[in-house]
Image: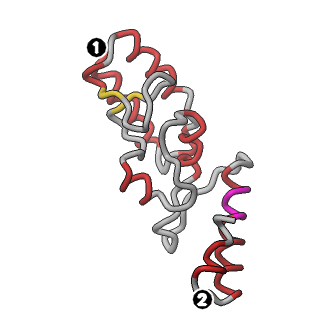
Amino acid sequence: MIIASPIFLFPVHWVVITTLLLYTYYHGIVDHSGINFKAYWWQPWQPDCLFHDNHHQYFHVNFAFNIYIWDKLHGTYRQKDRVYREDIYYGFGKALGECSASELQEEMEERQSENVTAYQTETDKEEMLREVAERIH
């Protein structure tokens, strides 16, 4: 009902709502299918597949489905200088500087397990790893 509610609350042409629903369903299927996709230049609102993969790996972040601006507005966008674990809730994470050596080591292993092809470039993943590596040494 939440997805269909605009039809009943606002005057929306059926073509517009049908297009939006098809777009949402399409990306929902692709996000969960294992297909590695990057957002096109004409989709500035659409995050890459890594965004939603991060939601499943670090389940306290990246809740927005197709428009990552909602996570940025609510502070639940995954940040590279934070650790997200089962015991750290609400998407805010724990600053790397506040983590113990064992937490940093676990975070390094978690980040190394991420699929490098999901990043825009290999440099992006290296930067994520470097953030933790600098704290460990």
Residue at horizontal 43%, vertical 52%? Answer: 71
* Amino acid bearing label 1: His
Q: Which mark is residue 11?
A: 2
Disc with the residue nearer the chain's start (2 vs 1):
2
Give the position of the N terminus as an image quadrant: bottom right
Residue at horizontal 68%, vertical 57%? Answer: 28
Magenta-drawn segment: 25-29
Identify the residue under disc 1: 137
Q: Is residue 75 visible?
A: yes
Asked if residue 69 lies left or right of residue 49, the reply is left
Give the position of the C terminus as an image quadrant: top left
* Amino acid bearing label 2: Pro
Quadrant for residue 13, please give it: bottom right
Residue 65: percent from the left, percent from the top?
Answer: 57, 56
Quadrant for residue 38, please give it: bottom right
Q: Nearer the viewer, mark 2 or mark 1?
A: 2
* Element assignment for label 1: loop
Q: Is residue 127 visible?
A: no
Distance between the alpha carbons at the discs numbered 2 and 1: 59 Å
Residue contact at pointers 2 and 1, CB within 8 angstroms: no
The 10 Å Cα crowd at callout 2, few under 14, some 14 to 19, many 20 or more, is few
Residue 41: percent from the left, percent from the top?
Answer: 49, 70
